[in-house]
Amino acid sequence: MIQQHKRRQIFLTEDTYIETTKYLLNSYQRLVQKKIEYNGSINDLRRLNYYIAEEAYQLFSLHYTIGKSIQPLRIELENIITKYEEYTIALRKDEDDEDWAPFYFTAIDEYERCMQLIGLCYLLHRRDLLPRIAAMQDKIYHEQTEQLDTLYEDFLSFELTDRYDVDQWFFDNPYRPLIFSKYRDTKQESIQDIQEYLKLWYPAFESAAWHDTHKMDEGLYFGYWAIEAAAYVYLLDLDDSEITHMIYPKDLVKFAREFVPSEKDISNPSTKTLKCEAGQTCPKTGEWYSPANNMEKRHFNQGEDMPEIKDNPWGLTIWYLTE
C-alpha cells in the first residue's frame, strides 16, 4: 500500500502507481531483450535505444514521485545517462550522422529532458556525469553560433569550464525567468524569478506527450517536476522556504544541501566502482548492493553468477561493489 505522506505528488494513486510500474517495467525489460537479439536496420535500433532510455527516465521519475528514498536515485541516474549514451552511439553509426545528439533543442520536451538530467546531476551530487551529458550534446550545438543556448551553457558552467558566454536561447516560454535568475543583483529578485518560472512551466509543455497524463484513464503519469528550477535554487543558494508549487522538488534541494559525499563516493572520479548486471559472473569477492535489493548488502564470491531480484520496481538488477 502507498503511504500517503510519502507521495510527492497527489495525482499518483495506488492503482496508477501499480499499473504504470507494471507497464513500464515490462516494456523496459522487453525492449532490452529485443535489443540483445536485434539484427535489423540501424533506424530500428535507434528507436529501440531511444525508448529504452526514455522508459529508464520515466521509471526513475515514477520512483521519485511515489516517495522512494533519494539515495538509490544517485545510482539510477547513471543508468539513465548510460542508456542515452547508447542511444547516441546508435544515432552516430553512420559517418554522415557522427555529430547527432540525443536531445534536439528545437523540441521543447527533449530540451527539458536534457535540463532535468543536468539538474539531477547537481541535486544528487553526481557532477561526475555532467561531462558525459556535454559529450553527447556539445558537438552539434557548438558547430554554429546560432545553435548556442544560454541556459544550457550557463547550467553546465556551474561545474564545467570553457563554456560559451552567449545571449540567446531556444524557448523564451517558460525559460526566460530561470535564465534571468542567475544575473539578478539580489537573491530576493532571483527567487521571484524562480517563482515566476514555476507558474509558467507546466502550461508551456502542452505539446509534450506526458502533459495531462494524470487526467487520462490509461495515461502513463510518472510525475511533473521542474528539476532545473530546484537545481538553480541550490546552485544560487536561494531561500526556498516560501515555494509551495507542487512541481518544485523541495526535498531534492534539501538532500543536495545536506549530503556530504565520502572520499570513496561513487561521484568521485578517482573512485573505481565495479558494477555487474544479473546473470553475469561476479568479478570480485566482496559486499555488493543494488537499488533492486533496496540497497541491502549481499556477499558474493568471484566466479558466482550474480542473481536477479525478480519483480523489482527498478527494472534490470545491477549490482555495485562496496569498497
Image (spheres, rainbow, N blue to C red):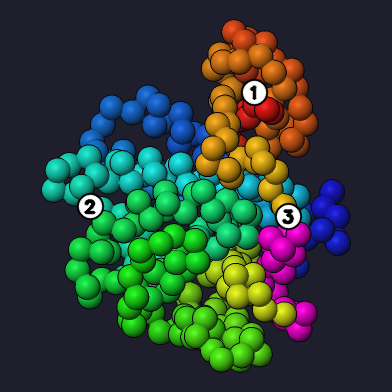
Residue 133, image x, y percentages: 42, 53
Three-letter amino acid code at the position of disc 2: Asp
SS for callout 2: loop
Q: Which residue is drawn at 58% across and 31% down?
A: 273
Q: Which amino acid does label 1 sit on?
A: Glu
Query: Between marks 2 and 1, how big is the CA–CA gap?
Result: 37 Å
First reached walking from the N terminus: tag 3 or tag 2: 2
The magenta segment: 240-259
Which kind of residue does numbered mark 3 sit on?
A: Phe
User: Residue reaching furthest top?
Assistant: 303
Task: Say which of 311 and 172 sits in front.
Answer: 172
> Crowding near pointer 3: few (<14 within 10 Å), some, many (20+)?
few
Labels in figure, total: 3
Tag on residue 219? none
Label 3 sits on residue: 259
Query: Which residue is painted at 75% across and 36% down in the image?
Result: 294
Local crowd size for mark 1, using a 10 Å CA cut-off: few (<14), some (14–19), many (≥20): some
* Image position, residue 169 (x, y; %): 35, 79
Callout in the foreground (1, 3): 3
State how far apart marks 1 and 3 are (Cα): 30 Å
Q: Does the magenta stretch include residue 256?
A: yes
Residue identifier under label 2: 99
Q: In this view, does 72 lie above or below 202?
A: above
Q: Which numbered disc covers residue 308?
A: 1
Task: Using the image as rendered, state which of residue 55 and residue 249 is in the foreground.
Answer: 249
